[in-house]
Image (cartoon, rainbow, N blue to C red):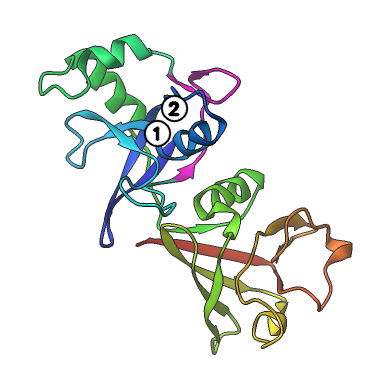
């Protein structure tokens, strides 16, 4: 698993993710809900990749839900997890992590294993949707495009359609569609309809990618009542806030 670690004001770095924990101590249902949003953290590198640190999933000390971590690669093949997705990579444990996190002197053998796990990973800022895992990665990083808005739309001279979304939690997202392009964004430019998306569906079929502003859609359900895109190629870039 790899993620964009947001530092605020557009600053960020890329890190492998080595663990995920959510400490829920409340007994009241509402407080449990609040803690489930604001208490979860991940184990990641610091900005210099010298130490492992705890990094809260959501920005602390605010009533707003603002992600500090944007997952860009969901692969967890070497993780041990419970039914809630809580756990860590197979050479770590909660007890081991608690024994050294927050200290300057961290076990050199553990740091070396973490570096080896990270070795060879290259984060490409511009990604293309080619298979199901690409869809899952984008849906995760974008929060399913919940609260997304078409901030810019430009049909370029080579026939590529450029879209820039704002409103997505913790980032803006650029998207490019090209090849046998079909689209209709009129419903999101109307005074009648809400410009903000509630969710999205991305489908790959017969050499095309379909992208529509509703959850759980099938190709047969896509009509001009929706904001949708169909093309041979869909590329995107995540721009952390």
Q: Which mark is residue 55?
A: none
Give the secondary structure at mark 1.
Answer: loop
Magenta stretch: residue 159 in it? no
Q: Are marks 1 and 2 in contact (CB under 8 Å)?
A: yes
Crowd rating for badge 1 (residues with CA inside 10 Å; few <14, some 14–19, many 20+): some
Estimate the spatial distance between the alpha carbons at disc 1 and disc 2, rounded to whole Å. 6 Å
Q: Is 46 on the left or on the right of 145, as rendered?
A: left
Residue situated furthest right in the rendering: 220
Q: Mark 2 highlights which residue?
A: 22
Q: Residue at x 72, y 81 (%)?
A: 187
User: Residue 2's image quarter?
Assistant: top left
Q: Mark 1 highlights which residue?
A: 39
Residue 203 seen by the camera = yes
Magenta stretch: residue 84 in it? yes
Percent across and percent down for residue 35 are: 45, 34
Q: Which residues are magenta?
A: 71-88
Give the secondary structure at mark 2.
Answer: loop
Q: Quadrant of the N terminus?
A: top left
Q: Residue at x 61, y 20 (%)?
A: 83
Percent across and percent down for residue 165 are: 51, 71
Q: Note whether 72 is above or below 54 in the view shown.
A: below
Closer to the camera in the image, 42 or 36: 36
Percent across and percent down for residue 111 are: 23, 21
């Amino acid at each position: 698993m790899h993620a964009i670690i947001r530092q605020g004001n557009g600053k960020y770095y890329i890190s492998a993710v080595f663990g995920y924990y959510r400490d829920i101590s409340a007994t009241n249902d509402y407080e449990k809900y609040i803690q489930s949003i604001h208490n979860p953290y991940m184990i990641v590198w610091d900005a210099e990749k010298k130490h492992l640190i705890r990094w809260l999933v959501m920005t602390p000390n605010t009533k707003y839900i603002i992600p500090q971590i944007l997952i860009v690669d969901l692969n967890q093949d070497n993780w041990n997890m419970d039914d809630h997705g809580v756990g860590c990579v197979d050479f770590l444990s909660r007890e081991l992590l608690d024994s050294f996190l927050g200290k300057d002197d961290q076990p050199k053998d553990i740091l070396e294993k973490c570096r080896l796990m990270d070795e060879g990973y290259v984060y490409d800022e511009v990604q293309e949707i080619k298979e199901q895992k690409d869809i899952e990665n984008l849906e995760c990083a974008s929060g399913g495009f919940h609260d997304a808005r078409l901030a810019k739309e430009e049909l370029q001279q080579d026939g590529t359609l450029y879209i820039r979304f704002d409103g997505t939690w913790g980032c803006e997202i650029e998207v490019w569609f090209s090849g046998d392009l079909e689209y209709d964004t009129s419903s999101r430019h109307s005074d009648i309809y809400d410009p903000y998306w509630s969710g999205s569906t991305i489908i790959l079929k017969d050499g095309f990618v379909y992208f529509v502003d509703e959850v759980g859609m099938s190709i047969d359900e896509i009509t001009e009542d929706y904001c949708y895109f169909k093309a041979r190629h869909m590329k995107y870039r995540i721009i952390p806030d």
